[in-house]
Image (cartoon, rainbow, N blue to C red):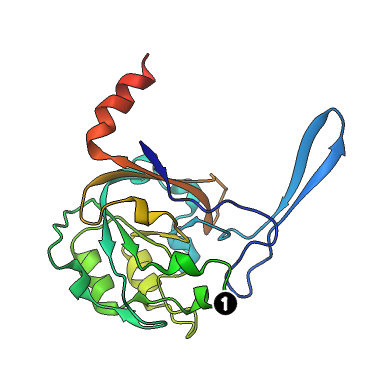
Amino acid sequence: MIYDLTRCISSGMPVYPGDPPVAITPLLAPPWQISTLRLGSHSGTHLDAPRHRFTNGIGIDEIPPERLIGMGIVIDARGYAANTPIGPEVLAGNRLQAGMMVMIRTGWEDFWGNDDYFRHPYLSADLTSMLVACGITLIGIDAPNVDSTVDGSDTAHVILLQAHCLIAENLCNLAALRCGVQYTFACLPLKIADADGAPARVLAWDANEDTVLRDAKHT
């Protein structure tokens, strides 16, 4: 089974405060269907490239494909209050290995479409530094930001992107995955030239199904 962890992009969807609103406008060109899209590079479920914070960092189009698919786990970080830091204690009992992806489940996706969505818990400096020290290559979260949206902080972004650790935000459906169990994740952003970020389709499947998927591809 493949799990879709992606928000559907639609007109008027929630966006980070100050980001461009999303508008999808159908055009009349009978018999063809075509639409114009207006959205920011960080609309919906999206991937942050190092260029998002560092002007000399690599852009979305420079990220090699092998960085976008890999093994990882979901970390249970539920129970934190609004706008509070998530500490390294959430890693207890989880085995992290260099090259893994880590998805942080705060439970805040339940507030999607509500103002409280932007008062989510966020990664503390200690937790972020520990994840980088472990060699984690991509961090995902079911919230709009790995930093505090309320305070406008950027500590986690700086630590992660400086270490070339990619960031996926606005994930959903993490409740369908078991915390601490290894999955294969695919985070596939639009390949936009020189982009600081891009909307992405984020998928997960049981690591044991990799062989099944490879066999199906060749049938």
Indicate the amino acid at tag 1: Asp
* 171, above or below 84, in the image: above
Image quarter for residue 139?
bottom left
| Residue ID for mark 1 | 115
- Report the quarter where the C terminus lies: top left
- How many marks can you see? 1
Secondary structure of the residue carrying numbered label 1: helix
Q: Residue at x 58, y 67 (%)?
A: 113
Give me the residue at 50% from left, 70% from top. 111
**Mark 1 residue crowding within 10 angstroms, few (<14) / some (14–19) / many (20+):** few
What x and y, as percent, mark residue 5? Answer: 43, 50
**What is the x, y in percent for residue 57?**
44, 61
Say if 141 sits above or below 63 in the image: below
Which image quadrant for residue 208?
A: top left
In this image, 109 relative to 86: left or right?
right
Image coordinates for residue 218, horizontal then vertical, percent: 36, 16
